[in-house]
Amino acid sequence: MAGHKLYTMSFAKVYPLYIHKAERKGRTKEEVDEIIFWHTGYSREELEKQLQQENDFETFFAEAPALNPSRRLIKGVVCGVRVENIEEPLMQEIRYLDKMIDELAKGKAMEKILRK
């Protein structure tokens, strides 16, 4: 999947979609941010900088301060594919994030989403 068009998509353009998906189901922007912070190690200021720079997904994950090792506990299907079976590392990181946002929108408790 090298060179997938998703890799060059601006994270800043997808971020509001994550928030909208969560808010439609009664969840909050703060919960979306908490998931992103947990997954990537970004602080609020670092996330804001990424959004302002309109970095693509490839840059967003390449510059992530500390990918959470517990993200490997994320299992399930996103876009018809099991996230734990995705071989391309960047695609797997993107789908981990998608899966956690899906879980948030489905009403799952934050403690379970963050694999605590």
Image (cartoon, helix red, strand yellow):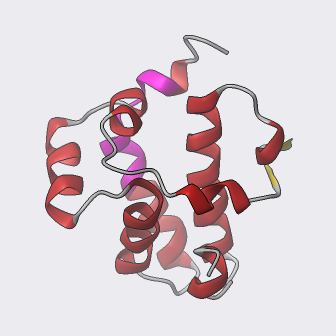
Residue 48 placement, left or right of 78: left
Residue 1, above or below 57 = above
Q: Quadrant of the N terminus?
A: top right
* Residue at the image point whose x is 68% and y is 71% from the top: 103
Residue pictured at 59% horizontal, 81% vertical: 25
Placement of the C terminus among the 4 image quadrants: bottom right
Question: Considering depth in this image, is 1 or 79 the residue closer to the camera?
Answer: 1
Q: Is residue 49 left or right of residue 30?
A: left
**In the rendered picture of this protein, how many numbered marks are placed on residues?**
0
Q: Nearer the viewer, residue 64 or 1?
A: 64
Residue 8 within the magenta-colored segment of the rendering: yes
SS majority, magenta = helix
- Residue 18, percent across and down? 48, 60
Q: Residue furthest top?
A: 3
The magenta segment = 7-15
The answer to which of 93 and 30 lies nearer the viewer is: 93
Tell me which residue sits at (53%, 27%) in the image: 6
Q: Horizontal and vertical percent for residue 65?
A: 30, 48
Displayed quadrant of residue 97: bottom right
Could you tell me residue 56's position as x and y percent?
A: 35, 30
Q: Position of residue 70 (x, y in %)?
A: 60, 62
92 above or below 15?
A: above
Give the residue drawn at x 63%, y 88%: 109
Q: Is residue 9 magenta?
A: yes
